[in-house]
Amino acid sequence: MVTCYIGIGSNLGERRFNLQMAIKELKKMFATRVTGISSLIETAPVGGPAGQGMYLNGVVEIETEMSPYQLLKELQRIESFLGRVRTVQDAPRVIDLDILLYGDYCINEEALCIPHPRMFERDFVLVPLKEIAPRVLEKLLKERPVEIKKVKTPVKIRKKAKKKEKKQRPQLKKRGKKK
Ligand code: AMP
């Protein structure tokens, strides 16, 4: 079994429903278990035709016995099943399924590039990935500091939120003692 992370996205039609259907199909895949599902976040489209709608994005963790190419084929089958029609690059889509990580594998071919070549510059991948697999993101940050440094919002926002929580904790304790 290999642990993999699948990026899921939709900016056409009933986006939430499309993503729910995709997850349902991921659960049905041969020799595979879905072991984690992130929250869904709304993000602006990157590239593609002007005027297209906002994306809903998330990340799903799976364990699979499929090979990377078998998995890619399955994801493409699910995309077609859910009504994705390929037109121009970065066009609006009912569903987009990408292999972000396949264990520690590195594959560098046009048909399949793992880790996904653009995942390190995409907030909408890194934020949900951090939510369901913080240690995986930590490892990536150590291995690829230059690539991931370019990402401004997700990691920093989360760090600030954690610091705020820490600052508030002692005050709460003091109040408790007075009572
Ligand atoms: P997209 O338009 O983002 O769905 O891109 C699909 C194309 O990217 C297909 O031709 C795939 O063969 C190729 N591709 C390369 N690497 C990956 C990957 N890690 N996950 C999904 N598709 C990939």
Image (tube, rainbow, N blue to C red):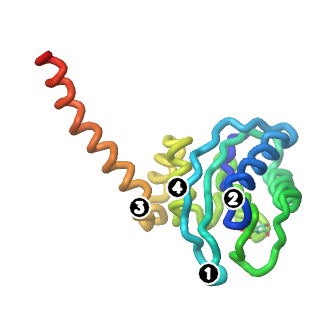
Q: Is residue 74 above or below residue 24?
A: below
Res 95 label: none
Mark 2, residue position:
15
Can the viewer see residue 147? yes
Q: CA distance from mark 2 to mark 1?
A: 17 Å
Mark 4, residue position:
126
Question: Of the residues shown, which amino acid type is indicated by label 4?
Answer: Leu
Q: Residues within 10 Å of mark 3 (few under 14, many from 20)?
A: few
Counting the numbered discs, the total is: 4
Q: Quadrant of the N terminus?
A: top right
134 on left or right of 65: left
Q: CA distance from mark 4 to mark 1?
A: 25 Å
Quadrant of picture, ligand 1: bottom right
Q: Quadrant of the C terminus?
A: top left
Res 153 label: 3
Question: Of the residues shown, which amino acid type is indicated by label 1?
Answer: Gly
Q: Nearer the viewer, mark 2 or mark 3?
A: 2
Q: Position of residue 45 (x, y in %)?
A: 59, 72
34 on left or right of 178: right
Q: Nearer the viewer, mark 1 or mark 3?
A: 1
Q: Mark 2 CB in 8 Å range of ligand 1?
A: no
Q: Is residue 98 above or below residue 160?
A: below
| Rendered residue at 69%/62% (across/down) | 10
Question: Of the residues shown, which amino acid type is indicated by label 3?
Answer: Thr
